[in-house]
Image: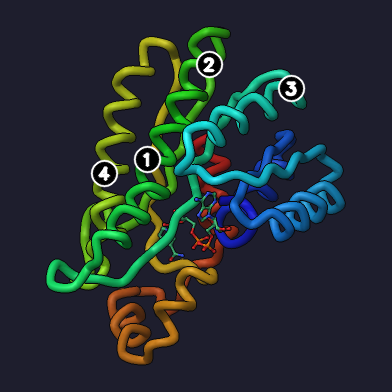
Amino acid sequence: GAARGIGAACARAFAEHGARVVLADVLAEPCEATAEAVTRDTGMETLAVEMDVSREADCEALLARCVERFGQCDILLNNAGIIARGSILDASTEDFDRVLAVNLRGPFLLSRAVANHMVERGIHGTIINMSSTNAVVTIPDQLPYATSKGGIAQLTKVMAMALAPHDIRVNAIGPGSIATDMLKTVMEDEAARRTILSRTPLGRAGEPSEVASVAVFLA
Ligand code: NAD
């Protein structure tokens, strides 16, 4: 999920701190453009890969591309995420499955591939999951999303317990409202905008770069 938004900001921040970054996304051209911009601005090598995190074969191929290009994977950021409006009264089965497939199965698939890679090679790496305040508090009409992020909270803990003996750290970041395309779709609704800002003490949405600095710290 590195083509835009928080993922793009994280790719940039990692590169600024000396990482060679593989940027993966379903959006091939924007991902390529972001990778080129990061390389141009930081001087660090990047690789853009078109893939879908909900597909097992794509996740395995992504790790293979990373290893082929850069030798190994030390840091995984599971950032790809989607939303679909719907409460328990009207959420569709299709939306529920789609959101869970990207937001929860994706991080499971990629983490399993990368964790095995790290354990096999004795890499003391780190896995970071982009969670949300929705893992803890919630909005009635965001059932699929909130459920997926609640799952991420437990996925993070259960992975952290299993990987600690291998000196691999697993953490999650739980941003509030961050100014990205995802938030724009919510903020377009004036009532929703007022609600969001009313519960945001700073009175503004956060910037993707502010979340990226947390990802760099955890890495
Ligand atoms: P965004 O929509 O701007 O970016 C998400 C990226 O993920 C896009 O580039 C998209 O193409 C990519 N993506 C979607 N489905 C994919 C798939 N199947 N495989 C690969 N890539 C895929 O959203 P964002 O706001 O930058 O969100 C990034 C992460 O941060 C998400 O996990 C989101 O839940 C989380 N988050 C966002 C906010 C916020 O307010 N924006 C708050 C808390 C958490």
Residue 47 lies in quadrant: top right
Residue farthest toward the bottom in the current orientation of the protein: 190
Q: How is the image coloured?
A: rainbow
Foreground residue among 187 and 80 = 80
Mark 3 or mark 4, earlier in chain: 3
Tell me whether the residue at label 3 lies in contact with that at label 1, contact meaning CB atoms closer than 8 angstroms: no
Indicate whether 41 appears above or below 15. Answer: below
As drawn, is 8 to the left or to the right of 175? right
Q: Earlier in the sequence, mark 1 or mark 2?
A: 1
Residue 119 at x, y = what percent? Answer: 49, 11
Upstream in the sequence, badge 4 or badge 1? 1
Real-space Cα separation, disc 2 to disc 4, in angstroms: 23 Å
Which residue carries the number 1 mark?
A: 105
Query: In percent of the image, x 73 and y 58: which residue is there?
Result: 29
The disc labelled 3 sits on which kind of residue?
Glu
Q: Which residue is mark 4?
A: 151
Give, as a three-letter code, the residue at label 2: Met
**Callout 1 crowding tier (Cα within 10 Å): few <14, some 14–19, many ≥20:** many
Q: CA distance from mark 4 to mark 1?
A: 10 Å
